[in-house]
Amino acid sequence: MRIYHSEMSKARRARTELDGGQLVPPWECPERVDMILAGLRKAGFTEMVEPAEHGLAPVLAVHDADYVDFLATCWDDWQALGREGEAIAWIWPTRTMPGRRIPSCVDGRLGHYALGADTSICGGTFEAAQASKDVALSALDHVLATGEPAFGLCRPPGHHAAVDQFGGYCFFNNAAVAAQRALDAGLSRVAILDVDFHHGNGTQQIFEQRSDVLFVSIHGDPMTCFPYFMGHADEVGEGEGAGYTVNYPLPEGTGAEVWFHVLEAAKERIRETGCELLIVSLGVDTFEDDPISAFKLSSDDFTEMGRRLGALGLPTLLLMEGGYAVEEIGVNVANVLSGMTSGV
Ligand code: OKP
Ligand code: ZN
């Protein structure tokens, strides 16, 4: 299987994440990329390809222009105020405010465009986000041209990024950008299966009114897990999109038996809706030793995950999302890819 990745993904090297009331080194670190590449090489994957530049047009097909402009200018605006720390949102238009005007000051803009305070913006963030979507789009081009599966080692991840919101370590929604591009290339329906531990709120928001993208997510119950305010089972899509959003929230502590049972239900929905392409938002933070997540999949379970995804028999684009057990992230990702190509 071809592996797409970009060295530019490491241009974002944030120093701080607000976690448990403290500023800690971010869980979503550039070392994840090298650990995944090392794990893939060790497992015998040798075809590593740099992406081609695709520009911002495919991004603007799913994200608002003012949001993209904010990401492009935020760090400079922040620095112009002489701030010492990284750009972190700290005030929001809450439920009791109208919040209709976008402030001009960067503090207000941060609150307007941020999902939470977990994700600092630093120099290199915009460049890394662009590299990440180029990785997704180049991998997509390969899948569409050959019918073979491909892996996009996207970093930063994307599934928490909404039409005009960043957070949860995500800036551009790589899976959504790729799905829209596939539709624009002539496909009539695409499935995005999100197996990251966290609900893909951004992907759901981008497509929840539409039936040409089926969004299916298996994740920690938002009653107790990030992103808390989206991902309940009764969110099923709206209008045209009714029935094309499917959420499977599962309790913390969920292990392989239940998880795979739910995966089969998710696959059935993908089969019956006649999707022509499968995009997997591949987080491996469902791993039992993930430091910020709470499912119990073992490294071997990721091989089984790959087999079961491959059994759908669809052209498949795998895109990296989360996974924070850095020591094991390489083997876990490699196991998914090996399982998928094992042909069993
Ligand atoms: C991103 B992805 C840990 C802070 C939580 C948000 C989690 C983002 C997950 N206490 N930060 O879905 O893997
Ligand atoms: Zn996650």
Image: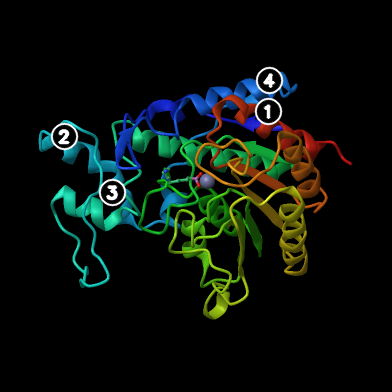
**In this rendering, the label closer to the viewer, 4 or 3:** 4
Q: Tell me if mark 4 has few (under 14), some (14-19) or many (20+) residues whose alpha carbon lies within 10 angstroms of its own.
A: some
Q: Can you say which quadrant of the picture contains the C terminus?
A: top right
In the displayed structure, 219 sits above or below 236; it is above
Secondary structure under tag 3 reads helix
Taking depth in this image into account, of 130 and 106 the one nearest to the observer is 106
Whichever of callouts 2 and 3 sits on the residue coming sooner in the sequence is: 3
- Disc 4 target residue: 41
Q: Which three-letter amino acid code belongs to the residue tagged 2?
A: Gln
Whichever of callouts 2 and 1 sits on the residue coming sooner in the sequence is: 2
Whichever of callouts 4 and 1 sits on the residue coming sooner in the sequence is: 4
- Disc 2 target residue: 79
Q: Residue 258 carries which label?
A: none
In the displayed structure, 216 sits above or below 310; it is below
Q: Which three-letter amino acid code belongs to the residue tagged 4?
A: Arg
- Disc 1 target residue: 331
Residue 20 lies, in percent from the top left, at: 35, 42
Secondary structure under tag 4 reads helix
